[in-house]
Amino acid sequence: MKSFALTSLSLALLSTAGAAHAQNSVTLYGVIDAGLAYVHNANGNEKVVGTSNGNLSGDRWGLRGQEDLGGGLKAIFQLENGFNVGTGALGQGGREFGRQAFVGLTADNYGTVMIGRQYDPLVDMVQGITGDNYWASIIGTPGDVDNYDNSLRVSNAVKYVSPNYAGLQFEGLYGFSNGAGTTGQGQTWSGAVAYNNGPLGLAAGYFYTSNPSADRTVVTNGSPTWNSPSTDSLFDSPINTGYITAHSVAIARAAARYAIGPVTVGASYSNAQYTPDGFSQFTTKQKYNIGSVFANYQVAPAFLVGAGYTYEKASGDTSATYNQVGLGADYTLSKRTDFYALAAYQHASGTQATYTTNAAGQSVRVDQSAQASIGSFGYAGTNTQELVIVGIRHKF
């Protein structure tokens, strides 16, 4: 990671602002992750061979910085852009800084307050001790219905991060609708607590967002999908072929991790519930229960291997079960560059609700067999799917 310090003199030369404080710094950083992928049963029983990007880490570049205000207080900021390395296109719906964009204050004794577009506390505190942290969505949730794979950012948000109390830390976030007369509508709030001390890691949290129909955005190419003024349109997943315009989404997550010498084991559980509004094709609350376990083995300082299993059970209009197994290997060439290989298999059973329009223009429900879709890669298959990826990742 390359960084450069901006002294008071250089800052004065770069801008016409007033005198700069000492200990100012700005860091330029990024990740480029690209590979070659093979997917069996990617669209029905078709095969896909091609490039795949952001497999272990989302492609990004960003700037982060701080200014020492004295007395242990610092001003901080971060701007982070997501992009597709295969096409050069902007990520996160075309936002220039769609991954993160915030400014705030931090003090060792009092914690940190940030305002802007940010990750929610479940991502910050729970995801880091799950298998997804090491191997991304091959050990993630089918369709990413619980934001296991960090698809979501919260806009217009205020977040507080506590100091670290001997390994114990907590976070809270509130996302505003920013609409006149809609303070309590389109809101998002979340909280999480984590304990990390030596080989042990524990974390749990809760996420909620509301989306009244006045603020809804209907996206029809997958399900479930929802949108709130304070959140992304998320969970656009091929695991269903109807769609939910959710009145609210609630996610509870918990995880544990323990390291024993070169071996790290962990487990996590999620419960996600979508309450549809009156415009949704779905008629009942959609619920997802997800359990996941993983194990990593540090074969050598530069060589890590791992495996994981994920189980997902959906109930409601869609009643399906997904079983997914993932394998990963990562070899570090240097501090900045590594090679990796990923493989996953998923089996789906049960039914998914689909909707067609009849001659009278009415929406008619037709159930179909559940389709397998590994992690958050976005391919819809038959009832089984296999995926293999080899790639390279460079950090700067």
Image (spheres, rainbow, N blue to C red):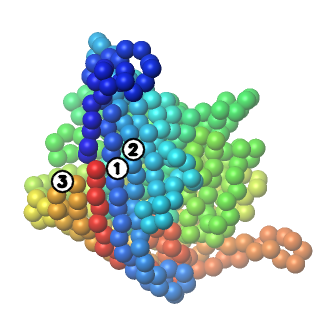
Q: CA distance from mark 3 to mark 2?
A: 19 Å
Relative to 146, say whether 27 is above or below: above
Query: What label does residue 30 carry, if any?
Result: 1
Tell which residue pokes out farthest to the top in this image.
71
Which SS class for mark 3?
A: loop
Which residue is nearer to you in this view: 118 or 52?
52
Counting residues from the start of the chain, the first of labels 1 and 3 encountered is 1
Tell which residue pokes out farthest to the bottom in this image.
45
Asked where in the image residue 347 lies, by quadrant, the reply is bottom left
Instruction: Name the residue that disc number 2 marks.
Output: 62
| Residue at figure coordinates x 56%, y 64% from the top left | 237
Which residue is nearer to you in this view: 355 or 154?
154
Q: Are marks 1 and 3 in contact (CB under 8 Å)?
A: no
Q: Would residue 35 be found to the left or right of residue 303 on screen?
A: right
Q: Would residue 37 be found to the left or right of residue 157 on screen?
A: left
Q: Are marks 3 and 2 in contact (CB under 8 Å)?
A: no
Kind of residue sitting beneath label 2: Gly
Q: CA distance from mark 1 to mark 3?
A: 14 Å
Instruction: Name the residue that disc number 3 marks.
Output: 335
Q: Are marks 1 and 2 in contact (CB under 8 Å)?
A: yes
Which SS class for mark 1?
A: strand
Relative to 151, say whether 22 is above or below: above
Rate crowding at label 1 as few (under 14), some (14 to 19) or many (20 or more) other CA atoms within 10 Å: some
